[in-house]
Amino acid sequence: MSAEVALQIPADAAGLADLKQRAAILLTRGDLEETRSLVDEALVGLPEDSDLLALRGTCRARQGELSDGIQDLASAVMLNPRDWELLNNLAVHLQQMKMFDEAVVFHVKAINNSEPEHHPQLYINLGLAMTGQGDFKAAVELFEAVLDVHPDMIDAAVNLSSVLNSLKEYARSAEVCKRTLALVEAPELYHNMGNALHRIAGRNADAVKAFERAIELDPTNLKSKHMLSLLRDEDMESIPSDFVAGLFDDYASYYESDVIEKLRYRVPGLVRRYLLKATPGRTHFPSILDLGCGTGLTGVMLRDLTDFQKGVDISRNMLVQALDKKIYDQIEAVDLQVSLGEIDRQYSVAIAADVCGYIGRLDGFVAKVFDVLEANGLFVFSVEESFLADYEVSAAGRFAHRRTYVQKVLTDSGFKVVTGAREQLRNSAGRPVFGMIFVAQKPA
């Protein structure tokens, strides 16, 4: 413990206030260990001090102890139930735990206990929680209410345009961005405008300009760079990992309702069907590796077939959703373009449902899968269908692959191709998306 932190708990109010101020400064600096030491020592003598509990709760959450941090924040709120900053802080951390219903309750309490000058940001926070709930209409109304009073508020415009894009109200989203950009520029607004415009017939040139301006304002903007590459039809071998992680982190809260209810996503059921079809009479596989497991939709379909199932995914927010299902024996955050994660066994089956849409050139990925399978192990995966090139980026921004290319990659890696069946994988914009379910086997 540093000399700055190792102090006696002050007996007077002024000394206690100074201690709290120093802890808050350390927390702002990011000195989490020193903050924790100072606050823990103070809480020994003052276990029901709401300020100290709030400081420790925030510190714990930033250290990765999110559940414990929320407990501290909840205790602080119980001691000081009208402190709007405390209520808001608790609500924000509940959102991080995907506890959106609870977050909404505390956001509303924060609004009710705060002065009007604080309402714009608190309304935005409430709107984000409602987005997590799937109540997009209510979120839109909140963001619009903020913009009616503060038309230059970037956070409100970005969140409103994002929700409208999710609702496929692209013209309306582009107009929101345009109005706010007339007052203040922000790369996030140009990116959202580009996302909306490129989905409107005849507006690709305008979308390109929007993405270009987003990159001018923020040269590190990988999302806009990726979209610009798509619109310029530039050759790519994979979609940037940071883009994929950000995409699915943002998508996690409403991913399942979107793909099941709107997109009629069929891949998890198809994976199970073709796995069992390739092994007549067999209903048990000692171990399954679910690559790009997402929220666990495929893992749910396979849990009864195995004793051990591991899920890996690049998106930590998706993994939080998967963890809640309790269908995986192990879960790991992994960038599949780099590795398949920590491998402590050979697997009977490897699954990659809707993973290849983010990997163009497949040979490196397929070779890694071959290495982690046991003799006679099976690799079951989906690809969207291309007829013109070995792999190309579709209008939806994902890779599609040609059947002959996939077959060649599998055989070159040592696999025997068992199945290559054409199926409807999902819908997109009201139309069916076709692809293939492949089953390949590693020879004995």
Image: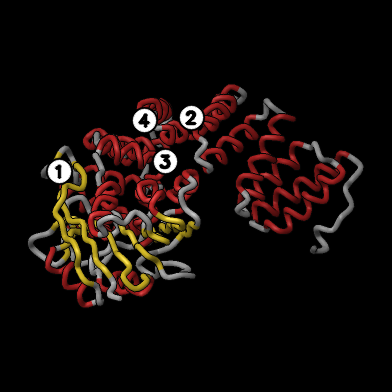
Eye-nearest disc, 4 or 3: 3
Q: Secondary structure at mark 1?
A: strand
Q: Secondary structure at mark 4?
A: helix
User: Which circle marks residue 253 in the picture?
Assistant: 3
Q: Are marks 1 and 3 in contact (CB under 8 Å)?
A: no
Eye-nearest disc, 2 or 3: 3
Q: CA distance from mark 2 to mark 1?
A: 38 Å
Mark closest to the chain's N terminus, 1 or 4:
4
Q: Are marks 1 and 4 in contact (CB under 8 Å)?
A: no
Mark closest to the chain's N terminus, 4 or 3:
4
The residue where tag 1 is placed is 432
Eye-nearest disc, 1 or 4: 1
Q: Position of residue 437 (x, y in %)?
A: 21, 56
The amino acid type found where label 2 is placed reads Tyr
Circle 2 packing at 10 Å, graded few (<14), some (14-19), many (20+), is many
Mark closest to the chain's N terminus, 2 or 3:
2
Q: CA distance from mark 1 to mark 3?
A: 24 Å
Mark closest to the chain's N terminus, 2 or 1:
2
The amino acid type found where label 3 is placed reads Ser
In the picture, measured across the screen, residue 172 lies left or right of residue 324, that is left
Circle 1 packing at 10 Å, graded few (<14), some (14-19), many (20+), is some
User: Which circle marks residue 123 in the picture?
Assistant: 2
Q: CA distance from mark 2 to mark 4?
A: 14 Å
Q: Position of residue 310 (x, y in %)?
A: 44, 58
Q: Position of residue 339 (x, y in %)?
A: 40, 70
